[in-house]
Image: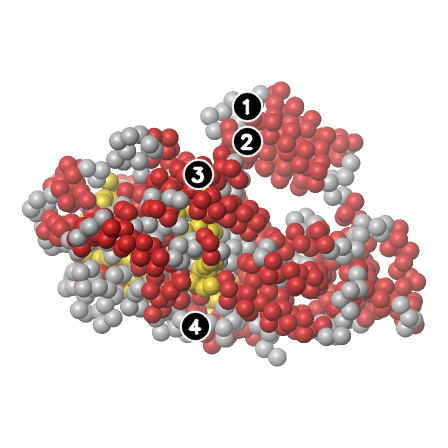
């Protein structure tokens, strides 16, 4: 059998073939607490820097500074330490080693040239232990450059279906908390189970871990394809490129730092732009990447690298948008990423001044500013323009004026929806003859779905009486035009304004549509924690829909976001907002805790608006081609594990003919959406696939006896994993369809399958791809209808008294002993799953899964299995006694929140939430049962509380501290 150890050997041997030297970890010259291999670091500093070669003791001074940075890292400041390390080795790398103490730059990683990169020492090792002592964490694969650990990989068994790369990634996330020092010098981490390869940066949630593919190798699922990904990515020059140019440290709206690392399509696209500029022969090109795949960050990476290339002699990089809201979004992306030398042209005068002054910065502006410019602004040949959403506004006067103003510039178009028509043709405008396909880089919808960069799009038709029949509308308009005596030209002139208004603004229709929207949202979307967008025919319709939806959802659940220009009658005054006010509204929409649930729009927020919490679009406006595709892709952003797709509810009948609605030459675009009716059609077969595992089992038997009978049909991990995979498909389909009456005949069997699934799901967080938690609607169903067992009925004494007799019965083979053992196991699983967030129960879950696997593999006897199972049951009961009731903790949090809301602070709403969370987190760690009755316990809790209130948040008010302690003493 191909084991995890065999897989590990294969991985480091594959990496070694790329120019890395393999050295077993125990042979590396490291001290107990060393993160760096300091002798390698010193050798590299001497090798790369003549000024240090003159006096090798200078290397010790550099290493001391590095060591201090690494060892001072804590889990809560890991991102900051990681950023500081990058700045130290690439930016703040001056040391006073020159003549008379003059500062000179020190090279840590062979500069940028291939000749210098060849001077680096590249090492791959395995089974690296840190700290290097008993109790240290053991890392599967570590890559070192010049003695610095820059990549860490965790590998899992390739032979068990339920184990996935997510389990390895989960281990890495745990290591980042327990041994953060190992990740200060980290560029990225990776994980695999032999079927999929995924990588990401430090502190990245599992949802943003991505694959690495190339144009030649885009498939996955086999060991050979994992090897291809490792071979393609783990090249010294690629890792150094990612480290230097494709890593960003950004700041979110709550002023928290996070790290961004490129996806492979961003790496490919940005480098294609850089390479073309460096070659200098071909001055244009098209990047065609699907909506939601990260084009904004691609531009950030490309701009960053272009600006750092010495060969380009301080180029000017211009980002051109055709919408003010897109300009705002791109500016926010660049600002969040802390990109230096950023400028903005808010007017024609500022644009002219920027180019006339020959500024060497990154400029963000709109295409419309060029419409007011005459003649040449700057003829330099190291000006690079990247035009966002390049399918619009580029073929007419605006695009022509921009090219005349900058006659020697490079022009690169980026689009998710190119137009390929006679009058408008993105390929002709930006494509180069040297690109046989018409584009430099392509990232398709299928690519983005496969990689998990975006989600599939489903559409759901509505009742016939709500559906707009386009043929009927056209016929009515033609009749009206004839009666009015309009000429052909006059018909065309009024068609857009008159054709659908009579139907779209019918009060009866609006009332029915809004009733349908409200019911659909409250029953299918809101229970899962997602939000929605209502797209109306025009601005007047926005007001009508808002008024009607308020009847069902309340005033605060919806808002209108619209363009209020040209509002001479002040009809839309209530919805007039400046940029800051609108940004605040959209932040509220993105906040899962905010009561705002639906945004009502007609033209705004249909492009460039990024809100992953948005799952459903209620579409009641005629659209087609790229405009339609861009709009519906607002719903396809990834958001946690429970969001499986974006959903379009179509009131217009746009998707009656998908091929006509998405009228692109590329047939693959027509596969963007799938019909929810298709899910219904397939659902019975999916259910039968799951039920086939339990032929002959009486599904009416309740309690643990029914579960035991079902579990006997899944005797090994192989059968359990297969069932788990099939169930997850049914679960996704059920949650997509619920609460459709169609499900009624399947509901009983589905509840039963859910009960079985929960009872056999691993309780140690392994196998997260197959054994993820079920969706919110299913959990509600489980809680309402399924009672596995009263997990609180057994006492500590019951367990201890039971074990001797039970083991004796087990040895004698007496009737009922096996059933009792199974009951204990089912009860234990239920207990552990009740406390999935408690570290003690997480540990119990890990012990139970290890025990199960040893028993199945024949490493322990059935008697030993039972003895250990009883020990676990005993420990679970004991741990349960120490659990603080949720209601008590909630009351404590509420009391603390009220207290700190009274503290005067300009940032009170955000600060309060963070203070209370920090107190809750730290007090839970240090408290123990009965701590209030001991001097040591009270002292420890006060110390922990002081570290939050007085030290971290610098609240010096003694009365506030005393009151907070009283609440903690009462509720914890």
> Circle 3 sits on which residue?
546
Whether tag 4 and tag 1 are in contact, CB under 8 A, the answer is: no
Q: Secondary structure at mark 2?
A: helix
Q: Earlier in the sequence, mark 1 or mark 3?
A: 3
Give the farthest residue toward the front: 483
Indicate which label's residue lies in the foreground, 2 or 3.
3
Q: Secondary structure at mark 1?
A: loop
Looking at the rendering, which quadrant does residue 389 occupy? bottom left
Q: Residues within 10 Å of mark 4 (few under 14, many from 20)?
A: some
Inter-mark Cα distance, 4 to 3: 46 Å
Q: Secondary structure at mark 4?
A: loop
Residue 821, how many percent across, how many down? 83, 64
Inter-mark Cα distance, 2 to 3: 33 Å
Inter-mark Cα distance, 2 to 1: 9 Å
Residue 892, how many percent across, how many down? 67, 33
> Circle 4 sits on which residue?
219
Residue at 51% of width from left, 30% of height from top?
909
> Circle 2 sits on which residue?
912
């Amino acid at each position: 059998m191909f084991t995890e150890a065999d897989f590990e050997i294969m991985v480091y041997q594959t990496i070694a073939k790329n120019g890395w030297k393999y050295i077993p970890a125990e042979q590396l010259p490291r001290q107990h607490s060393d993160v760096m291999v300091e002798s390698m670091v010193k050798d590299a500093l001497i090798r790369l820097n003549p000024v240090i070669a003159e006096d090798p003791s200078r290397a010790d001074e550099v290493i001391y500074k590095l060591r201090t940075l690494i060892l001072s890292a804590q889990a809560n400041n890991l991102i900051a330490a990681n950023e500081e390390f990058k700045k130290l080795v690439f930016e703040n790398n001056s040391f006073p080693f020159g003549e008379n103490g003059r500062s000179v730059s020190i090279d840590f990683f062979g500069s940028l040239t291939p000749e210098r990169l060849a001077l680096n020492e590249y090492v791959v090792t395995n089974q690296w232990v840190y700290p290097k002592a008993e109790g240290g964490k053991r890392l599967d694969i570590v890559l070192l450059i010049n003695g610095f650990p820059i990549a860490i990989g965790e590998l899992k068994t390739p032979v068990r279906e339920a184990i996935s790369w997510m389990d390895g990634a989960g281990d890495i996330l745990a290591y980042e908390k327990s041994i953060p020092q190992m990740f200060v010098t980290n560029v990225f981490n990776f994980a695999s189970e032999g079927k999929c390869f995924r990588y990401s940066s430090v502190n990245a949630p599992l949802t943003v871990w991505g694959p690495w593919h190339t144009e030649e190798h885009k498939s996955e699922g086999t060991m050979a394809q994992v090897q291809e990904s490792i071979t393609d990515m783990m090249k010294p020059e690629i890792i150094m490129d990612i480290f230097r140019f494709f890593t960003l440290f950004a700041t979110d709206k709550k002023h928290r730092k996070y790290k961004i690392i490129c996806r492979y399509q961003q790496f490919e696209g940005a480098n294609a732009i850089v390479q073309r500029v460096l070659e200098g022969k071909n001055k244009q090109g098209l990047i065609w990447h699907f909506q939601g795949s990260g084009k904004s960050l691609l531009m950030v990476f490309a701009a960053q690298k272009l600006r750092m290339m010495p060969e380009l002699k301080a180029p000017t990089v211009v980002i051109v948008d055709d919408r003010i809201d897109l300009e705002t979004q791109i500016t926010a992306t660049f600002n969040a990423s802390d990109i230096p030398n950023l400028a903005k042209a808010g007017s024609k005068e500022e644009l002219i001044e920027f180019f006339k002054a020959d500024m060497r910065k990154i400029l963000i502006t709109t295409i419309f500013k060029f419409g007011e410019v005459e003649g040449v602004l700057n003829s330099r040949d190291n000006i690079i323009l990247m035009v966002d959403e390049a399918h619009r506004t580029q073929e007419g006067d605006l695009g022509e004026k921009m090219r005349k103003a900058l006659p020697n510039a490079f022009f690169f178009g980026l689009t998710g929806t190119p137009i390929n028509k006679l009058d408008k043709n993105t390929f002709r405008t930006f494509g180069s003859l040297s690109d046989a396909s018409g584009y430099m880089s392509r990232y398709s919808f299928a690519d983005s779905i496969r990689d998990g960069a975006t989600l599939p799009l489903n559409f759901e038709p509505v009742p016939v009486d709500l559906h707009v029949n386009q043929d009927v509308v056209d016929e009515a308009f033609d009749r009206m035009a004839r009666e009015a005596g309009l000429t052909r030209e006059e018909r065309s002139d009024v068609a857009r304004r008159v054709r659908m208004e009579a139907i779209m603004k019918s009060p009866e229709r609006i009332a029915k549509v809004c009733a349908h929207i409200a019911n659909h949202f409250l029953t299918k979307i809101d229970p899962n924690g997602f939000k929605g967008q209502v797209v109306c025919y025009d601005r007047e319709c926005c007001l009508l829909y808002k008024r009607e939806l308020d009847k069902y959802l309340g005033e605060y659940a919806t808002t209108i976001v619209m363009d209020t220009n040209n509002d001479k009658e002040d009809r839309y005054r209530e919805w007039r907002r400046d940029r800051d006010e609108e940004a605040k509204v959209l932040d509220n929409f993105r906040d899962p805790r905010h009561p705002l649930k639906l945004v009502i729009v007609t033209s705004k927020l249909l492009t460039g608006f990024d809100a992953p919490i948005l799952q459903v679009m209620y579409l009641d406006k005629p659209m087609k081609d790229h405009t339609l595709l861009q709009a519906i892709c607002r719903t396809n952003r990834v958001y946690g594990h429970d969001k499986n797709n974006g959903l379009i509810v179509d009131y217009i009948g746009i998707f009656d003919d998908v091929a006509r609605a998405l009228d692109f030459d590329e047939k693959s675009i027509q596969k963007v959406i799938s019909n929810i009716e298709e899910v219904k059609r397939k659902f019975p077969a999916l259910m039968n696939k799951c039920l086939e595992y339990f032929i002959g089992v009486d599904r009416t038997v309740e309690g643990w006896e029914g579960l035991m009978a079902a579990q006997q049909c899944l005797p090994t991990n192989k059968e359990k994993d297969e069932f788990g995979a099939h169930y997850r498909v049914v679960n996704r389909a059920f949650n997509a369809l619920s609460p459709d009456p169609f499900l009624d005949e399947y509901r009983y069997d589905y509840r039963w399958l859910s009960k079985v699934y929960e009872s056999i799901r691993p309780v140690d967080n392994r196998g997260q791809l197959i054994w993820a938690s079920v969706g919110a609607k299913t959990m509600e169903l489980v809680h309402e209808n399924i009672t596995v067992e009263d997990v609180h009925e057994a006492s500590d004494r019951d367990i201890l008294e039971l074990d001797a007799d039970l083991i004796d019965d087990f040895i004698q083979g007496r009737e009922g002993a096996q059933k009792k053992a199974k009951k204990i196991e089912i009860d234990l699983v239920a207990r552990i799953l009740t406390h999935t967030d408690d570290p003690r129960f997480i540990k119990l879950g890990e012990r139970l899964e290890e025990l199960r696997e040893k028993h199945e593999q024949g490493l322990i006897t059935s008697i030993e299995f039972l003895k250990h199972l009883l020990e676990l049951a005993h420990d679970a009961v004991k741990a349960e006694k120490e659990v603080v009731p949720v209601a008590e903790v909630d009351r404590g949090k509420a009391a603390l929140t009220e207290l700190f809301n009274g503290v005067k602070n300009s940032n009170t709403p955000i600060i309060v939430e963070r203070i209370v969370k920090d107190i809750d987190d730290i007090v839970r760690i240090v408290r123990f049962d009965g701590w209030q009755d001991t001097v040591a316990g009270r002292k420890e809790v006060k110390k922990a509380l002081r570290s939050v209130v007085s030290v971290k948040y610098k609240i010096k008010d003694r009365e506030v501290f005393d009151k907070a302690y009283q609440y903690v003493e009462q509720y914890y």
